[in-house]
Each structure stands twice: as C-alpha cells, then as structure tokens.
Image (spheres, grey):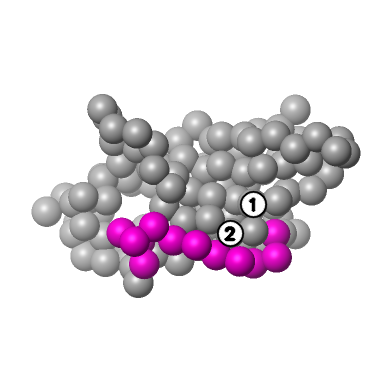
Amino acid sequence: QVQLVESGGGLVQAGGSLRLSCTASGTIFSINAMSWYRQVPGKQRELVAGITSSGSINYADSAKGRFTISRDNAKNTVYLQMNSLKPEDTAAYYCNARITTKLPIVNAYWGQGTQVTVSS
C-alpha cells in the first residue's frame, strides 16, 4: 500500500510564500513523475507543476516565474515553493505520483490535499 502525505498549506497574505511538501511511503519500487495539482470548489482539478524522475519539469502558465517544483528522490518527496502568491492561488493543493510498486505495474496515487488560502 502506498500513501502520499502533504504538508505546508496555510493562510498567507498576497505576495507571501509557502512551501508544500509531499512524501510517499509504503511498498515502493520506484517513483516516476510527481506533480502538484490544485482545485477550487466547482472547478476541475488542474495541473500546477510536474517533475519526472530524471528532473524534467513543466509548469502551468499561472505558475511560471513564481512557483518552483523540486524533488528529493532519496526521501521520496516532492516540494512546491510558491512565491508572490495571489488570491487566485487559493485552492486545495494535491500531490500526485506515478509509482511502481511491483514491476511492471504503475499506478497513480493522490494525497489528501492541503489548503492554501491567500488573502488580499
């Protein structure tokens, strides 16, 4: 069984920063891509940033220049450094990871979500 546990959300003023963390644990053979998504009530979950096991990165346009995704493979952890936060960044942020528990099976797992609220 695999678990993703997120932390680091909270309330911050516009222009402030937060750092989200997500750690995978359990029966893990390897972790492929790790990503951050966000969702506001009534809207679809959207990709914020993703990083592959080799370090290739992609960002949503809304995150470019303000957010930085990174990962520590030794710790099975992905981070999202969010700077210059705006009220429109307010959302529940979810970690996603594509994990091989037993070759050749790869499954996608989700964390429970962490709330980020940016006040104006």
Question: Which quarter of the picture shows residue 61?
Answer: bottom left
Image quarter hosting the N terminus:
top right
Residue under the point 35% across and 72% down: 65
Amino acid bearing label 1: Ala
Q: SS class of the residue under badge 1?
A: strand
Which mark, by number, is residue 12? none
Q: Which mark is residue 33?
A: 1
Q: Which residues are magenta?
A: 53-64
Residue 21 rendering spot, x and y as whole percentages: 52, 52
Which residue position is annotated with label 2? 51
- Residue 16 at x, y percent in the picture: 26, 63
Q: Image quadrant of residue 44? A: top left
Q: Give the mark nearer the N terminus: 1 vs 2.
A: 1
Q: Residue at x 67, y 43 (%)?
A: 98
> As drawn, is 104 to the left or to the right of 88?
right
Does residue 14 appear to the left or right of 102 in the view shown?
A: left
Specify whether residue 5 is in view.
no
The image quarter in which residue 106 lies = top right
Please, what secondary structure does the residue beneath circle 2 have?
A: strand
Decide whether residue 90 is among the magenta residues.
Answer: no
- The residue furthest bottom is 65
How many other residues sit within 10 Å of disc 2, few (<14), some (14-19) or many (≥20)? many
Q: Position of residue 58 (x, y in %)?
A: 50, 62
Residue 38, position as x, y percentages in the image:
38, 42
Q: Main secondary structure of the magenta part?
A: loop
Mark 1 Cα shell of 10 Å, populated few (<14), some (14-19), many (≥20): some
User: Which residue is nearer to you in this view: 103 or 87?
Assistant: 103
Report the residue at 64% width, 52% height from top: 33
**Residue flagged by tag 2: what amino acid is it?**
Ile
Q: Is residue 87 placed above or below 39 in the rendered structure? A: below
Mark 1 and mark 2 in contact? Answer it, CB < 8 Å: yes
